[in-house]
Image (cartoon, helix red, strand yellow):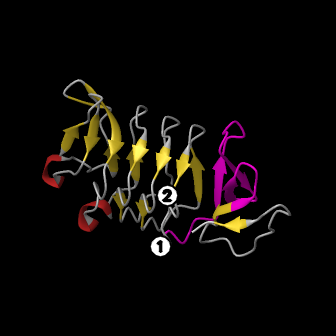
Amino acid sequence: YYETKEDGTIKITGYDTDQIDVSDGIFTIPSQIEGKDVTEIGDSAFDNYEFNSAIIQIKMPENLKIIRRNAFQYFIKVKKLEIPDSVTTLEEWAFYYFESIDKINLPASLEKYEGNAFESYSGSVQEFAISDSNTNYKVKDGVLYTKDCKTLLQVPYGKTEIDYPSGLTSIGN
């Protein structure tokens, strides 16, 4: 299911699990629908526990820009998550209940990271990583901060010890 946005691109709003072949365990999101780029995954677009819990890999299109709240839920067997460098926005709980991931590579182009984009049930995550070229965020010892390290944004749920930077002034929501 999808809708055409004002800019002519596509926002995926849901899916019909009967129409998708994931016999190989790979869930591929199309880069285009009806000749238009897929640039956004909407709120709770992929939230079918029974279907998602069998997936081992998600392939996202390289033109994806926005991943909304609860967009991906219950992909409990996915071990590696590749978020395209084109993604600029990750909303709160964008990835919910990912039990098998240990490292999350954030896109170099990330401009907006809301709250806990990786919800607490993603307990195996040990560290975040992001390119030094990102102008908004920084990862230090696997923990996500604003670029100036004044605000801690998210601690991986599997991380048990943290050395806070000396300039830290706030902890995100």
Q: What's under tag 1, amino acid-wise?
A: Tyr
- Residue 9 percent coordinates (x, y): 29, 31
What residue sits 30% from the left and 59% below the top? 44
Residue 119 lies, in percent from the top left, at 48, 67
Q: CA distance from mark 1 to mark 2?
A: 14 Å
Q: Amino acid under label 2?
A: Lys
Above or below 1: residue 94? below
Task: Tell me where the magenta segment starts and ends, as one range.
Answer: 122-151
For the view shown, which residue lies furthest in the bottom direction? Answer: 160
The residue pinned by badge 2 equals: 79
92 in relation to 37, above or below: below
Point 14% across, 47% down: residue: 19
* Residue 37 as seen in the image, left or right of residue 169: left
Tell me: residue 111, above or below residue 103. Answer: above
**How many C-alpha atoms fall within 10 Å of the one at disc 1: few (<14), some, or many (≥20)?**
some
Q: Secondary structure at mark 2?
A: loop
Q: Nearer the viewer, residue 98 or 10?
A: 10
Q: Nearer the viewer, residue 89 or 6?
A: 6
Which comes sooner in the sequence, label 1 or label 2? Answer: 2
x, y percent for residue 29: 31, 41
Question: The C terminus lies in which quarter of the figure?
Answer: bottom right
Q: Quadrant of residue 55?
A: bottom left
* CB-based contact (under 8 Å), mark 1 and mark 2: no
In the drawing, does residue 17 fall left or right of residue 38?
A: left
Q: Is residue 144 magenta?
A: yes
Name the spot of residue 58 as percent of width and height, x first. 39, 48
26 relative position to 99: left or right: left
Q: Residue at x 67, y 39 (%)?
A: 135
Q: In this figure, which residue is indicated by the disc labeled 1?
A: 121
* Crowd around label 2: few <14 · some 14–19 · many ≥20 (10 Å): some
